[in-house]
Image: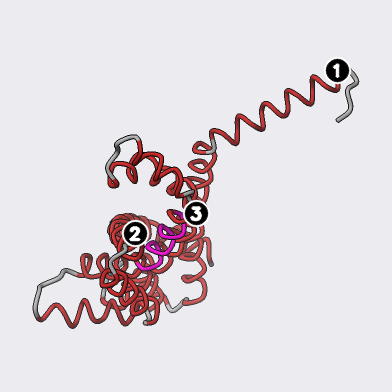
Amino acid sequence: MIIHILLSTYPVFLEATLLTLKLTVVSLILGSGIGLVFAFLSLSRIKALNYIATFYITIIRGTPLIVQIAILYFGLSSIITFSQFWAGALALGVHSGAYIAEIFRGSIQSIDRGQLEAARSLGMSHPLAMRRIVLPQAFKIAVPTLGNQFIIGLKDSSLVAYVGMQDLWGSALSEAASNFEQMNTYIVVGLYYLALVLIITYGVNKLEGNMDVNGGKKRKRKIKTNKYNESFGIKR
């Protein structure tokens, strides 16, 4: 029966998959921008900016995502008109932004401050030194954790179904209500989510491997050195 549902519902679920991917990508772009801004606020020497960042991160991390989606869609829509898509994308972006802010903050703080001071001594402004010296290294460090956050963001996007969006989970609820095979339908949609997660995981792993330039060269040099030593009977 699972095969029957998989074959009969794939046109609906493929369209829903595209909507889920679009929603996830837009929300993560928003979340990354928001997270970077609040990471800088939390690292600022101005106490008021630190308090703003702390307040935002505490509120967002301390309340359920479904509540945030409901507030944006049902609450703010009385002031500003939001479509279902943009209400969901904005809520997901604001939600993930709090976690991404902490990821960026930790990554930036892990970079030796001496590098920033050396760049400043060469005449770079603070923003330029951050952009050219600190942020590229911080992003490299943050890639694995950001990958996990992106996967969480993909799965969290299922909650927009409760404001009427026909994403993967919303389509699954509609299909299950019409075919009365809830378990099999949920298993099928779970396979779609699993496939998306595996694709994102593969992409993140490839990106992490491509960015590990120094580590890759060191490993290659070590392998060549070991082969050279073994050929001459040198023990290390």
Tell me the crowding category of disc 2: few under 14, some 14 to 19, or many 20 or more residues within 10 angstroms, Cα based: many
Q: Nearer the viewer, mark 1 or mark 2?
A: 1
Figure check: 157 above or below 30: below
- Amino acid of disc 1: Ser
Q: CA distance from mark 1 to mark 2?
A: 53 Å
Where is residue 217 drawn, in percent x and y?
Answer: 60, 29
The tag earlier along the polypeptide, 1 or 3, is: 3
Q: Secondary structure at mark 2?
A: helix
Residue at 34% x, 34% y: name it.
122
Q: Is residue 229 visible?
A: yes
Quarter of the view holding residue 15: bottom left
Badge 1 vs badge 3, beta-carbon distance below 8 Å:
no
Quarter of the view holding residue 156: bottom left
Residue nearest the viewer, comparing 129 with 99: 129
Residue nearest the viewer, comparing 188 with 26: 26
The magenta stretch spans which residues? 98-107
Residue located beneath label 1 in the image = 231
- Amino acid of disc 3: Ser
Q: Secondary structure at mark 1?
A: helix
Q: Secondary structure at mark 3?
A: helix
Where is residue 171 drawn, in percent x and y?
Answer: 35, 68
Residue located beneath label 2 in the image = 24
Residue located beneath label 3 in the image = 110
Q: Is residue 87 left or right of residue 229?
A: left
Quarter of the view holding residue 152: bottom left
